[in-house]
Image: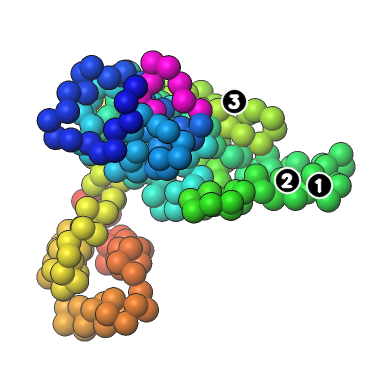
């Protein structure tokens, strides 16, 4: 398949496979649209697997995302799952492979894994090889976390098996459509260029009101000085008592 450097609005994706292999690396699979951020892997499409908005919604039969979620910031896990939910047709299958933090902890304590080489290998499994940009692990998972996140993001019929004592192989089926707002995802606001407009929109979308003068000034100063980042503003708002009261009032 010819390498696609970008997603063109007029490209006919109906002629391409209806299965996606996200973050494929060198694991190029036939009958899949192989997508990776790095052109050196020679994927079918070079793209960020969390920004595939130009791919058609409710279209794909299967999404394979092996060893991907742990490379994303912890707060982006559900956002990625919802983004992939959008791409899958109803009844489509999501296949994941992610590290089990409890499995790795057990291995680190296992008597047969106490050599320096084994311990260093397991630490690498936990934190990534860190050999190149993006090859860092930002999070890990337990079965409780996986099941809850998948259910929140519209997936059911969840099957989780352990591989090599420290990896979860996961299969789940899309059972309903879920929007980013359903999981408190306001990342679209991050695309607003002007800081003041971003803060205004964030207050109105998250807290349901106009920003107070003190709050707006504080956030503006923090952004201009580089002391805080935009995502931190959203975390502060979502963790606030004001937001929790508003959220509970809606129930």
* Span colored in magenta: 27-34
SS class of the residue under badge 1? Answer: helix
> Badge 2 is on which residue?
121
Residue 117, numbered circle: 1
Across and down, in percent, residue 93 comes to 38, 21
Mark 3 or mark 2: whose residue is earlier in sequence: 2
Q: Residue at x 52, y 37 (%)?
A: 67
Report the residue at 67% width, 48% height from top: 124
Q: How many C-alpha atoms fall within 10 Å of the one at disc 1: few (<14), some, or many (≥20)?
A: few
In x, y percent, where is residue 214?
A: 21, 83
> Is 231 situated left or right of 148 in this image?
left
| Cα separation between marks 3 and 2 | 22 Å
Q: Is residue 67 left or right of residue 211?
A: right
**Mark 1 → mark 2, Cα distance in angstroms:** 6 Å
Residue 247 seen in render: yes
The answer to whether residue 156 is above or below residue 23 is above
Prevalent SS, magenta region: loop
Q: Position of residue 236 (x, y in %)?
A: 34, 68
Q: Residue at x 14, y 35 (%)?
A: 9
| Closer to the camera in the image, 42 or 241 | 42
Residues at discs 1 and 2 in contact (Cβ within 8 Å): yes
Please name the residue that numbered disc 3 is placed on.
161
Considering only order in the chain, which callout, 1 or 3, is on the residue closer to the N terminus? 1
């Amino acid at each position: 398949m010819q390498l696609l450097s970008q997603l063109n609005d007029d490209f006919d994706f109906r002629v391409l496979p209806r299965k996606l292999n996200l973050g494929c690396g060198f694991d190029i699979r036939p009958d899949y649209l192989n997508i990776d951020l790095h052109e050196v892997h020679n994927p079918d499409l070079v793209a960020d697997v969390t920004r595939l908005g130009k791919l058609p919604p409710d279209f794909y039969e299967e999404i394979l995302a092996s060893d991907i979620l742990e490379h994303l910031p912890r707060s982006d896990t559900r956002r990625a799952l919802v983004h992939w939910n959008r791409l899958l047709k109803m009844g489509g299958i999501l296949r994941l492979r992610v590290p089990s933090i409890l499995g790795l902890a057990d291995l680190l304590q296992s008597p047969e894994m106490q050599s320096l080489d084994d311990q260093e290998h397991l630490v690498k499994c936990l934190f990534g090889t860190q050999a190149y940009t993006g090859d860092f692990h930002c999070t890990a998972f337990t079965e409780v976390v996986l099941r809850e996140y998948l259910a929140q993001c519209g997936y059911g019929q969840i099957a989780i098996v352990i591989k090599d004592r420290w990896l979860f192989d996961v299969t789940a089926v899309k059972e309903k459509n879920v929007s980013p707002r359903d999981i408190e995802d306001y990342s679209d606001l991050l695309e607003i260029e002007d800081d003041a407009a971003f803060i205004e929109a964030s207050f109105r979308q998250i807290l349901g009101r106009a920003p107070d003068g003190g709050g707006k000034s504080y956030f503006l100063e923090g952004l201009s000085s580089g002391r805080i980042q935009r995502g931190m503003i959203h975390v502060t708002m979502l963790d606030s008592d004001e937001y929790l009261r508003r959220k509970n009032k809606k129930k």
